Image (cartoon, rainbow, N blue to C red):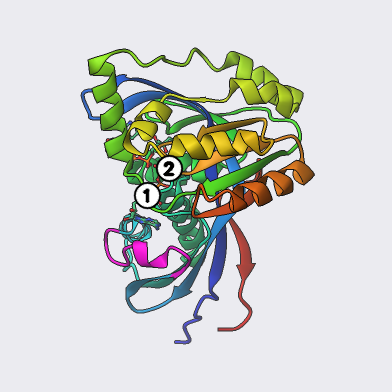
Amino acid sequence: MLSVVPLPVIVRAPSKVNLHLGVGDLREDGYHELTSVFQALSLSDDVRFADADQLSVTVRGDDARAVPTDRRNLVWRAAELLAERAGRAPGVAITITKGIPVAGGMAGGSADAAAALVGLNELWQLGLGRAELSEIGARLGSDVPFSLHGSTALGTGRGERLLPVLARDTYHWVLALAKGGLSTPTVFRELDRLRAEGSPPRLGDAQELMHALASGDPHALAPLLGNDLQPAALSLAPALRRTLRAGTDAGALAGIVSGSGPTCAFLCADAEAAVAVGAELAGAGVCRTVRIAHGPVPGARIIDHETEH
Ligand SMILES: C[C@](O)(CO)[C@H](O)COP(=O)(O)OP(=O)(O)OC[C@H]1O[C@@H](n2ccc(N)nc2=O)[C@H](O)[C@@H]1O
Ligand SMILES: Nc1ncnc2c1ncn2[C@@H]1O[C@H](COP(=O)(O)OP(=O)(O)OP(=O)(O)O)[C@@H](O)[C@H]1O
């Protein structure tokens, strides 16, 4: 019998910034209750899926050496979960081209996991809907459902329960990538410690920020950006204070630590301002490198079916 080898599939998955990250108390399951307004950004990873006898992961790009290529990689676990669901072997060669900083608070691993769910659903012709993929994604990590969803969304629970948020127009960002990474659980633990010691201020609700998003005016949005994890990230990486100051000194409307950090995200008035802020920040010696990005962009999506391999 003739068996047809499926053509490789390439999926692009976005990074994210939390425009509002309200962190509630520690739950019994070890997670914190969150109120998160996510925005998906154009800084992204591309992930290729090719039919193979065995599961393998190859990583390319700037931070490739910091990424595991075995079962610790979220794409590996995504492939195993989907294969189990489909009752088939997880044979696939996965190549990740990293654009998203590793352990940078921008959901890089989650983006790749979301790409794997979309890419393997296609390669293996599983026919699973978005809701099913999102439910599998939530088992891989709190940020994975948003990496599938993309655009701008409100996340509750541990961040995995999503509702779309209206965001008019495009926002322009400068991202200051740091030398090292920060571990997400360590940053949450540091916040618990700071809260046990004293009372770092907590964000209010996200209503006003969501109104500003609907207006499409970055000047209205800028003063409303907020992140309850920021004091914890700054406590673990105090040099980020200087980075944040340098961004606003360079003309950004506002700067925040992205998620658990250490990437700092600067909102700019328009595309031209972002280029100017990016250039000045790159010369200020306060970060490893600078990237310009815009959002919102879609969630993990197929960008190519290769015609030859
Ligand atoms: C900081 C954020 O990026 C904001 O969007 C996310 O909350 C983190 O999402 P993630 O990296 O997908 O995190 P997960 O893999 O689900 O969790 C890693 C660890 O972070 C902590 N964690 C995560 C999410 C949450 N709501 N509360 C937590 O306390 C827990 O210690 C957990 O064991
Ligand atoms: N595909 C992947 N890409 C990057 N890191 C991965 C991947 N799979 C597993 N990891 C591991 O996960 C750790 C956290 O990486 P990741 O880049 O997802 O962090 P992050 O962007 O800060 O996450 P988040 O913003 O969702 O909290 C890395 O140090 C790495 O060891």
**Marks 2/1: CA–CA distance:** 6 Å
Quarter that holds the C terminus = bottom right
Q: Categorize mark 2 by other alpha carbons within 10 Å: few (<14), some (14-19), many (20+).
A: many
Residue receiving disc 2? 262
Name the residue rendered at 46%, 34% in the picture.
241
Q: How many marks?
A: 2
Residue 115 image position (x, y, % from top left):
49, 56
Q: Secondary structure at mark 2?
A: loop
Residue found at x 45% / y 38%: 240
Pointers 2 and 1 in contact (C-beta within 8 Å): yes
Instruction: Decide: is 52 above or below 63.
Output: below
Residue 62 lies in the magenta-colored region: yes
Q: Looking at the image, can residue 148 be seen?
A: no
Label 1 sits on what residue type? Gly
Look at mark 1 in the image and give the residue it sits on: 181
Quadrant of ligand 1 in image: top left
Query: 158 and 119: which one is in front?
Result: 158
Q: Position of residue 111 (x, y in %)?
A: 48, 51
Question: Sequence order check: which comes first, mark 2 or mark 1?
Answer: 1
The residue under the point 62% across, 33% down is: 248
Residue lying farthest to the front in this orientation: 284
Q: Is residue 52 above or below residue 287?
A: below
Instruction: Kindly tell me whether mark 1's CB lies below 8 Å from ligand 2.
Output: yes
- The answer to whether residue 127 is above or below residue 132 is below
Q: In this rendering, does residue 135 appear at all?
A: yes
| Residue 260 rendering spot, x and y as whole percentages | 40, 37
Determine the image quadrant of residue 44. Answer: bottom right
Q: Is residue 291 left or right of residue 242?
A: right
Q: Residue furthest left?
A: 28
Q: Give the crowd class for mark 1: few <14, some 14-19, many >=20 residues within 10 Å.
A: some
- Magenta residues (range): 60-72
- Label 1 secondary element: loop
